[in-house]
Image (cartoon, helix red, strand yellow):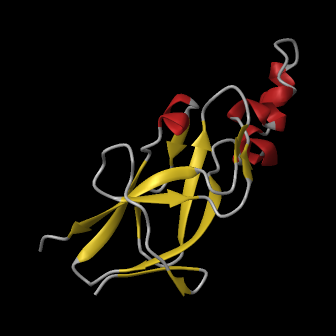
């Protein structure tokens, strides 16, 4: 039996309005997803000093986080059977046009958190209540 809860309370999720056969997943809190260009390593990049900056490139702590995904909490838990799994899809045109890449498209139902990488030029602010993904529940084939 499938159970859907948010912060421990049973809820009914709305179906996605974009025509996908799944549930609309919304953000629980406001989150800012920084652009790759906001990274300190790329901000200080200067063609005249690139030789100095490339020394110790692999050990640079700023460079280690360039493509680190940002987690957007939802507070939603979907309890599924052992034969089911959940696929997350960028369903909203807002997210697709803002150059957000979904980092972890297959999740377990325990405390769904959506992870994004911002490949755009500007930081993206997701507000609480924004639809950020569609959760599609699939049957596993053995």
- Image x and y of residue 133, in percent: 47, 52
Q: Quadrant of residue 33?
A: top right
Name above or below for residue 31 compared with residue 56.
below
Marks counted in the figure total: 0
Q: Determine the residue positioned at 76% across, 47% down.
A: 59
In the image as oriented, which residue stretches furthest toward the top? 48
Name above or below for residue 73 compared with residue 66.
below
Name above or below for residue 38 compared with residue 6.
above
- Image x and y of residue 81, in percent: 27, 84
Decide if residue 30 is on the left or right side of residue 40: left
Q: Nearer the viewer, residue 58 or 115?
A: 115
Decide if residue 44 is on the left or right side of residue 16: right
- Image x and y of residue 87, in percent: 35, 60
In the rendered image, which quarter contains the C terminus?
A: bottom left
Q: Determine the residue positioned at 37% across, 43% down.
A: 18
Q: Nearer the viewer, residue 17 or 102?
A: 17
Q: Determine the residue positioned at 51% across, 41% down.
A: 101
- Image x and y of residue 76, in percent: 53, 73
In the rendered image, which quarter contains the N terminus?
A: bottom left
Decide if residue 46 is on the left or right side of residue 115: right
Q: Quadrant of residue 35?
A: top right
In the image as oriented, which residue stretches furthest toward the left? 142
Name above or below for residue 49 compared with residue 128.
above
């Amino acid at each position: 039996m499938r159970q859907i809860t948010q912060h421990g309370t049973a809820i009914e999720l709305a179906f996605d309005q974009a025509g996908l056969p799944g549930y609309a997943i919304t953000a629980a809190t406001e989150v800012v997803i920084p652009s790759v260009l906001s990274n300190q390593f790329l901000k200080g990049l200067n063609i005249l000093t690139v030789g100095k900056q490339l020394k110790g490139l692999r050990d640079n702590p700023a460079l280690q986080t360039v493509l680190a995904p940002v987690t957007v909490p939802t507070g939603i838990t979907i309890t599924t059977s052992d034969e089911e799994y959940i696929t997350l899809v960028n369903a909203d045109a807002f997210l697709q046009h803002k150059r957000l890449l979904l980092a972890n498209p297959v999740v377990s139902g325990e405390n769904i958190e959506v992870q994004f990488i911002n490949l755009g030029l500007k930081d993206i602010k997701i507000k609480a209540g924004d639809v950020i993904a569609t959760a599609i529940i699939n049957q596993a084939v053995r």
